[in-house]
Image (cartoon, rainbow, N blue to C red):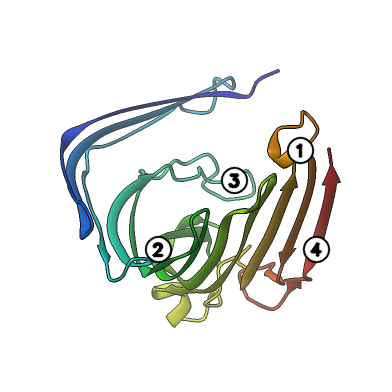
Amino acid sequence: GPESRDTVEQLTYGAAYSLDWQGRGSVDLSLSRSRYRKAIDFADLLRPDIAVRDDPWLATATGSLILARKLALYGGYVRGLEEAPIAPEIAINRNEAPPATRTRQMDFGLRYAVSDHMNLIAGLFSVKKPYFNLDASNRFRELGGVDNRGVEVSLAGSVAPGWSLVAGSIFIDPKIGGEAVRTRQIGDQPVGSLRRRSIVNLDWRPAAGHSPLSLDFALESLSARMANAANTLEVGPREALNVGG
């Protein structure tokens, strides 16, 4: 039967301002307050129930600037809130629930209209958040912060009538910073992190897109991934090909 029941409640309220300057660019600003509550009710009466609360202020600022008829510059800054995982069964503080984590994301890039129905995007990004894992004593806790910096490139749109394409790659250099890395308890690469993810999705619908028949092709390619906290073991790269209709 069920071992636990998780209940998460979140109420967010705030204000936002949006400016769309036709032919020149746009600006979006927002400020909000989020009330977050998480409760875990364990079926085992010997395990104490858990309740965590958080009431953060969250801010967002994004914008774009049209440089030429087909070229635009974009950027953004977002403060976010993510649910943190509870300590796993193998931890000495198993089932302990940390508070919700605060995240910060910044991105900047260019968007180019290859055609009226196809866009090319290239940008830089940085996503920072607390890093939770097991320490040397097998306690699950915040070991520092992780910064996922990288480059993203994508091409999306209609290649021709009936043909749709979504393709892109993300190249990431994730780094952990904090006490556990400085004292060499763990490596500076997060467990499960990868350096590259690439996808290609192609959809063909005959009769210039009016046919009820659709044929699909999808390819995903992942680089090697870090498999342990000491950064001494990796899971090899893999590719997945899907064809359907």
- What SS does tag 3 mark? loop
Q: Describe residue 128's horizontal placement relative to residue 58 as left or right.
A: right
User: The N terminus lies in which quarter of the figure?
Assistant: top right
14 relative to 25, above or below: above
* Marks 4 and 2, the one that precedes in the sequence: 2
Question: Where residue 56 sits in the image (x, y, percent)?
Answer: 22, 43
Task: Please identify, in this view, whether the residue under mark 2 or under mark 1 is nearer the observer.
Answer: 1
**Dot 2 surroundings within 10 Å: few (below 14), some, or many (20 or more)?**
some
Q: Which of the numbered marks, if any, corresponds to residue 239? A: 4
Question: Which picture quadrant has residue 143?
Answer: bottom left
Spatial distance from mark 2 to mark 1, Cα to Cα?
Answer: 43 Å
Percent from the top left, x then y, of residue 112?
43, 67
- Which of the 4 image quadrants contains residue 75? bottom left
Above/below status of 209 relative to 171: above
Q: Disc 2 residue type?
A: Val
**How far separated are the C-alphas under marks 3 and 4?**
30 Å
| Secondary structure state at the residue bearing disc 4 | strand
Disc 4 from disc 2: Cα separation: 26 Å
Marks 1/3: CA distance? 53 Å
Q: Nearer the viewer, residue 239 or 115?
A: 115
Give the labeled residue for mark 1. 207
Q: Which numbered circle lies on residue 127?
A: 2
Residue shown at the point (53%, 69%) measured from the top left:
153
Residue occupying the point 48% across, 73% down: 150
Q: Position of residue 67 (x, y in %)?
A: 28, 71
Nearest to the observer: residue 119 or residue 34: 119
- According to the picture, the residue beneath numbered tag 3 turns out to be 88
Apparent side of residue 214 relative to residue 69 in the rendered image (left or right)? right
Q: Residue at x 20, y 60 (%)?
A: 24
